[in-house]
């Protein structure tokens, strides 16, 4: 009995450790958002350039995640977790001391190596620890981390940046990372079976060229124009590499990513919805502080405090939505959540420099409730469509698409803002506001498309797909 109790306790501590690691990685991913205006001034860069501090993080994580299906088959969960945390610690120190913008971006890439390893790893661990009938609860825990960590970054960092400067953000994160490293060394154990599998270097090369080419090409539009070679060449190379990657995965007996899972309708449904949610969440959390600080002229601290109440609501909503999904399914939650998001983005389109703080707080709170209602069902639907043996590849695919969606959406929408902000016929503030309204309009359309997708989908119990 004591041995059983001890084993249960160690499993609990392992879950807490990997959730804490994921929370810290995602918290750090969006930590610099409210510091963007300060960093832009210090390094004399524009909005399109500064967003690379987030986009580079997302891009590296996106390129690494597809390898996790192989890595989780080849190496133990303990070894991968320790490696991820070590990379994160090194990247954090390098970020804190970076003397230039290029080196700061490079240090963020080192951090992202850890994040890219950790995100699919923690999801796989949760899905192995919790049985199928409790996967809504497990995905609720994961959604709590995925949603709340990035959301609480801007409010906290806004206060710290105003008082201590942006470099202190990394010094404050460092002891937390070291503490989690110690916990992982004590409590981590393996939950997956290892086997000898061949690693396909060509597939990795194609993912690097594909994802980085598309993002790099799109990010150059605001600087060089769509018809320039610096846009068209990387875009063409990127899309070609992605197409070749897909073709190669379907031809290999042991692919890096098992794309044949897209034959499962419920998996596709959940992955598409997660893709949309990732765009809406990251883009809103990046653009709204830009509106509050650059258009309305408020401080980073004010920006953070405006976002803080929504963070609390998101934490509650994410956890509750997992329970509701287990009981009632995802359709009602999805319709409610996306309906709220459509309304919020419509209101955002009509905001101006005189918009009051109460309206901003209410709208962001509603936005976070909408995200909480949509994220958990989307993830649970996708994962419940898979058999136990397919979970490693399924989580890698879902996280790859989620991360790439966030990077792609952020790049496109910040480019729209920059194109308008740099117009010669209006001043910077007026142009930025016009670009933000256009970006919010695009997100309203995306939320509406997702609502229609949920509405037209047949109501099914995803657990019926298990085994």
Image (tube, grey):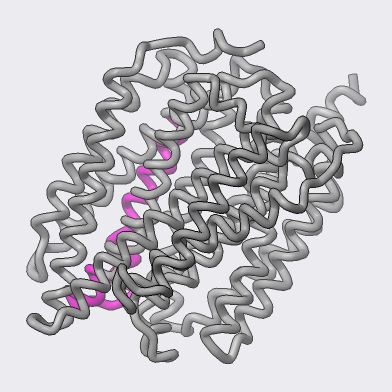
Quarter that holds the N terminus: top right
Q: Nearer the viewer, residue 191 or 315?
A: 191
Can residue 308 be seen at all in this image of the molecule? Answer: yes
Occupied quadrant, residue 209: bottom right
Rendered location of residue 411, percent (x, y): 38, 62
**For residue 241: magenta?**
no
Find the magenta span and give its range.
291-320
361 lies above or below 433: above
Quarter that holds the C terminus: top right
**For residue 293: magenta?**
yes
Rendered location of residue 221, percent (x, y): 33, 70
Q: Nearer the viewer, residue 26 or 218?
A: 218
User: Measuring 45% from the left and 30% from the top, which residue is drawn there?
Assistant: 378
User: Measuring 40% from the left and 69% from the top, which residue is drawn there?
Assistant: 231
Q: Nearer the viewer, residue 351 or 151?
A: 351
Q: Is residue 13 left or right of residue 3?
A: left
Q: Is residue 309 left or right of residue 242?
A: left
Rendered location of residue 203, percent (x, y): 69, 49
178 lies above or below 280: below
Occupied quadrant, residue 390: top right
Q: Residue furthest top?
A: 464
User: Measuring 35% from the left and 19% from the top, which residue is drawn there?
Assistant: 331
Q: Is residue 64 left or right of residue 49?
A: right
């Amino acid at each position: 009995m004591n041995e059983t109790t001890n084993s249960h306790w160690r499993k609990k501590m392992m879950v807490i450790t990997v959730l804490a690691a994921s929370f810290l990685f995602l918290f750090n991913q969006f930590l610099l958002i409210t510091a963007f205006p300060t960093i832009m001034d210090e390094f004399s860069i524009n909005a399109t350039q500064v967003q690379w501090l987030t986009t580079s993080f997302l891009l590296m994580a996106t390129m690494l995640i597809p390898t996790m299906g192989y890595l989780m088959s080849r190496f133990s969960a303990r070894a991968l977790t320790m490696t991820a945390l070590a990379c994160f610690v090194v990247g954090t120190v390098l970020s804190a001391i970076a003397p230039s913008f290029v080196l700061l971006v490079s240090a963020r890439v080192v951090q992202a190596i850890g994040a890219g390893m950790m995100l699919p790893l923690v999801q796989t661990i949760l899905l192995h620890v919790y049985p199928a009938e409790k996967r809504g609860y497990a995905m609720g825990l994961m959604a709590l981390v995925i949603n709340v960590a990035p959301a609480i970054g801007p409010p906290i960092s806004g206060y710290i940046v105003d008082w201590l400067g942006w470099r202190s953000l990394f010094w404050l994160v460092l002891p937390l990372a070291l503490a989690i490293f110690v916990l992982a060394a004590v409590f981590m154990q393996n939950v997956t079976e290892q086997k000898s599998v061949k690693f396909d270097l060509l597939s990795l090369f194609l993912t690097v060229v594909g994802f980085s080419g598309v993002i790099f090409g799109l990010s150059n539009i605001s600087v060089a124009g769509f018809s320039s070679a610096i846009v068209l060449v990387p875009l063409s190379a990127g899309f070609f590499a992605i197409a070749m990657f897909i073709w190669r995965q379907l031809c290999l007996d042991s692919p890096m990513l098992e794309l044949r899972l897209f034959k499962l309708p419920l998996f596709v449904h959940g992955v598409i919805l997660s893709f949309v949610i990732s765009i809406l969440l990251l883009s809103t959390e990046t653009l709204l502080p830009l509106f509050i600080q650059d258009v309305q002229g408020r401080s980073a601290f004010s920006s953070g405090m405006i976002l803080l109440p929504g963070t609390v609501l998101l934490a509650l909503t994410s956890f509750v939505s997992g329970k509701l999904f287990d009981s009632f399914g995802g359709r009602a939650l999805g319709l409610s959540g996306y309906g709220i998001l459509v309304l919020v983005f419509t209101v955002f389109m009509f905001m101006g420099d005189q918009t009051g703080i109460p309206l901003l707080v209410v709208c962001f709170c509603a936005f976070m409730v909408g995200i909480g209602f949509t994220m958990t069902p989307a993830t649970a639907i996708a994962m419940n469509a898979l058999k136990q043996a397919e979970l490693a590849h399924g989580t890698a695919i879902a996280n790859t698409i989620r991360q790439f969606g966030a990077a792609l959406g952020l790049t496109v929408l910040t480019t729209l803002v920059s194109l308008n902000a740099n117009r010669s016929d209006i001043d910077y503030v007026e142009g930025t506001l016009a670009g933000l309204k256009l970006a919010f309009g695009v997100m309203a359309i995306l939320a509406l498309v997702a609502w229609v997708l949920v509405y037209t989908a047949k109501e099914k119990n995803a657990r019926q797909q298990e085994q």
